[in-house]
Image (spheres, rainbow, N blue to C red):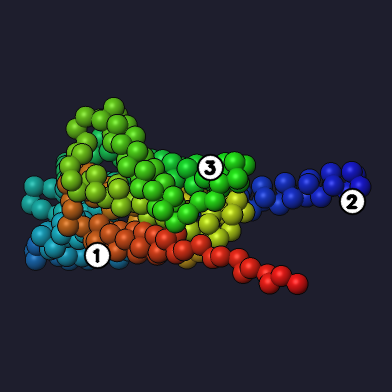
Amino acid sequence: MSSSRLVALLAVVGAAVAAVLGLLTFGSQASARPDGVPLAIAAADPLRPVAEKIAAHGGGAVSWRVDTPDRARAALADKEVYGVLELGAAGPTIVLSGAVNPQGTQIAQQVLTGAAAALGGQVRTEMTAPASTAGRTAPLAASALLWIAGLVAGAGLVVLGAKLGLKATPAHRIGLIAGVSVTGVAVVAGFFALWDSGLPLNFDVLGYLLLTAVAFAALQGALLRYLGIRAMALLGPLYLIAPAVAGQVPEMLDPAYRALLWSWTPFRFAAEGLRSLLQGTPDAPDVTLGLIVLGSIAVAGLVAVALPNQRKAVQPAK
């Protein structure tokens, strides 16, 4: 291949990579719009007709749920809705939760404030499980940092092992997963303490972080083992794509992004489960779902990494 053809080919490849990453990262943000955002209106029987009237508005952007105050608050705790508008004799009250994705809380506050203003009277706002700035940032940040730690360690084993002529055994790979998982969690825990000393670092939080780290490192280790350094073409862009999507609520994503990216990215399971634990809501369904998904990834990855190396058949002497 001539130099001019190589230059032209690399220019096209570079533009193609930029187009794909732009479509998958910035595209998900540029096309974001509300579509069926789940909100609740809570009212006792005398005010039920008022609640039904409010719920009749909003179009496809909002999915209203009319319920009793107790059931509406339970739905908020389970993250089935992003906010509740309670109607009472003393005036409307907006109920939000710090355990909900910050983007969902922001959208809920805007919509519910507008609905409450139309009713007149003084509007109160109540925040359950309040989250600090660090508490809102920490879940996704932790997931990204643990992914990077495992990625650097796994790729380093492949590159340096080949350069030094070392053959990594299953024991080496499992040892690396264990080592980078423990040290990665230590780094994240240190950042939590630095950012906000009020963030809990109890058994539940540290255990969930460790499970996330093992799942990520095992997945990366399995792909790197069987694909070699070529796996970086998948694992590297995934770091750029997944957090951009996982940081948003699905109701703000275009349906294509919601189905093709948000539905399966491991970052969302890690971040949302950790968010619930940090905000003191360990019984939230996303904690259980995260344990199941991350546990399955960890087991599958460790099994793939632990399989013995295949020995090359010895050619018989001629």
Residue 181: mark? none
Residue 118 picture location, percent across and down: 26, 50
Residue at image coords 90%, 44% = 4
Label 1 residue SS: strand
Q: Is residue 28 left or right of residue 116?
A: right
Of 42 and 90, nearer the camera is 42
- The mark lying in front, picked from 2 and 3, is 3
Q: Amino acid at mark 3?
A: Gly
Q: CA distance from mark 2 to mark 3?
A: 31 Å
Provide residue 246's location: percent of width, then percent of height. 42, 52
Which residue does the image show at 30% across and 52% down from the upper left?
A: 211
Q: Which residue is mark 3?
A: 156
Which amino acid, by three-letter code, is at mark 2? Met
Q: Please indicate, yes or no, whether residue 11 appears anywhere in the rendered image.
A: yes
Farthest residue in the top direction? 194
Residue annotated with mark 1: 65
Q: Quadrant of residue 291?
A: bottom left
